């Protein structure tokens, strides 16, 4: 499942995103994968099989996913507080693609490929604050708006115009403390992909703009990235894999609600049983409004948000190879506080880490099992695994026909 629950005792720079989309300059990716056949639409959940094992093992499929999944979806790459001041810039990567996000002198948030148009050096190696970006190879200098400002000793080069060699733009947008980029010019806007999430979060009284990062942890897991996402999107494994978390949740009420590009998990804290004591038998107490005390979202393909009244956490899943995955957790609090508030926050993070360690064991076991000659594909629990089915269908949709 890979997310945390929150203790009730836990305590509680404006950027304008650019509104003009970049020109359509990127060509459609062409993907050729060895020994692969066209994927036909899957059967209804109760009759469907899981993705064949090759989708978790073949490097060629990962290469296709880099282009057709990660190259066409909104990727969380930075925090808004890193870009709070005019002149701030942050380099990042979308898998193998270097990018840089800038807070321009005009107040606009922009993003570009972090590649000099001369000989492909990078123009930003570390985050900083400047009025320009300079490639450390030959000194070509760009404004924070991406325009080429200086290119030494190019006077004798024929048919060369500085205005034709600005940084290549990519799309950028922000929600709360999260900054996203999208490499595909024709992808739906972030607001369309997120659907009702921002409005639902705001209507529930959560102020995500006040959240500030307090801790970040990374975990390198020996499994395919989809193994980890599959695991996150179902509570079916809770009774066996997460005994402590299982005691906290109302498992019978656990359900996953699907939307076009995201899903929401309903995992309410259960009420205390007779004789149980908070702090001895249970960590968390169900609030008076029950399920409304927390919101859990997954955004296709690889981003999770867990949102509470006074804190939230994000989890980004990135493939490092066909059988290696980097998961990055980050916790945000509106008022981290001190004393009991700080201790409660640390307990929340520690419990999340405990759940993560349990999930790592399971995911690595699954990856070993996928390599077995005895396994080809499985079946879904129609009662418990609709979230996994939804995710795998989106993977099929985005990958589309894959040529031999």
Image: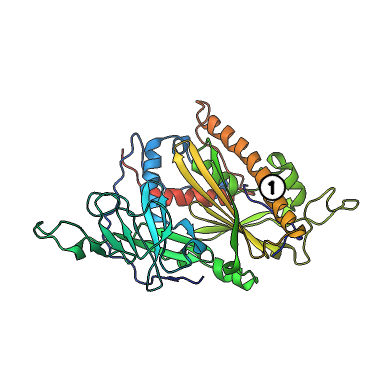
Q: Quadrant of the C terminus?
A: top left
Q: Which residue shows up at 37% across the image and 46% down it?
A: 96
Q: Which residue shows up at 60% across the image and 71% down it?
A: 202
For numbered disc 1, what is the local secondary structure? helix
- Location of residue 117 in the rendering, given as x and y in whole percent from the top left corner: 24, 55
Task: Answer yes or no: is residue 49 visible.
Answer: no
| In this rendering, position of residue 314 left or right of residue 186 | right
Task: Answer yes or no: is residue 259 visible.
Answer: yes
Q: Nearer the viewer, residue 218 or 393?
A: 218
Q: Nearer the viewer, residue 252 or 242?
A: 242
Residue at which label 1 appears: 350
| In this rendering, position of residue 330 left or right of residue 144 | right
Q: Which residue shows up at 50% across the image and 25% down it?
A: 373
Here the colouring is: rainbow
| In this rendering, position of residue 27 left or right of residue 95 | left
Task: In the rendered view, tell whether residue 201 sits above or below residue 249.
Answer: below
Task: In the rendered view, tell whether residue 229 sits above or below residue 144.
Answer: above
Task: In the rendered view, tell whether residue 32 sits above or below residue 168.
Answer: above
- Location of residue 1 in the rendering, given as x and y in whole percent from the top left corner: 63, 47
């Amino acid at each position: 499942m890979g997310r945390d629950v929150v203790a009730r005792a836990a305590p509680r720079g404006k950027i304008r995103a650019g509104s003009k989309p970049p020109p359509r300059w990127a060509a459609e990716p062409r993907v050729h994968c060895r020994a692969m056949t066209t994927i036909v639409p899957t059967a209804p959940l109760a009759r469907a099989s899981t993705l064949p094992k090759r989708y978790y093992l073949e490097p060629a499929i990962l290469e296709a996913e880099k282009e057709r999944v990660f190259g066409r979806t909104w990727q969380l790459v930075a925090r808004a507080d890193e870009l709070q001041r005019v002149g701030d810039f942050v380099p990042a990567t979308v898998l193998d693609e270097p990018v840089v996000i800038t807070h321009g002198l005009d107040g606009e948030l922009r993003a570009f490929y972090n590649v000099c148009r001369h000989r492909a050096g990078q123009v930003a190696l570390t985050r900083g604050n400047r009025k320009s970006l300079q490639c450390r190879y030959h000194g070509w200098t760009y404004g924070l708006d991406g325009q080429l400002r200086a290119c030494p000793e190019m006077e004798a080069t024929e048919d060369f115009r500085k205005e034709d060699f600005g940084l290549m733009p990519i799309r950028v947008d922000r929600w709360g403390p999260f900054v996203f980029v999208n490499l595909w010019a024709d992808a739906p806007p972030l607001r369309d992909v997120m659907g009702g999430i921002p409005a639902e979060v705001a209507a529930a009284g959560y102020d995500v703009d006040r959240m500030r990062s307090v801790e970040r942890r990374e975990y390198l897991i020996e499994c395919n990235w989809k193994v980890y996402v599959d695991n996150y999107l179902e509570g079916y494994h809770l009774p066996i894999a997460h005994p402590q978390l299982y005691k906290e949740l109302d498992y019978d009420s656990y359900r996953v609600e699907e939307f076009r590009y995201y899903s929401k998990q309903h995992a309410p804290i259960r009420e205390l049983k007779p004789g149980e004591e908070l702090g001895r038998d249970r960590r968390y107490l169900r609030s008076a409004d029950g399920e409304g005390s927390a919101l859990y979202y997954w955004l296709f393909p690889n981003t999770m948000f867990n949102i509470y009244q006074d804190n939230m956490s994000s989890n980004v899943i990135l493939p490092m190879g066909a059988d290696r995955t980097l998961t990055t957790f980050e916790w945000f609090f509106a008022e981290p506080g001190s004393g009991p508030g700080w201790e409660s926050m640390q307990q929340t993070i520690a419990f999340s880490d405990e759940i993560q360690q349990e999930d790592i064991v399971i995911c690595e076991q699954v990856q070993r099992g996928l390599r077995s000659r005895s396994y080809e594909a499985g079946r879904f629990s129609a009662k418990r695994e609709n979230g996994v089915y939804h995710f795998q269908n989106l993977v099929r949709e985005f990958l589309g026909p894959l040529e031999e």
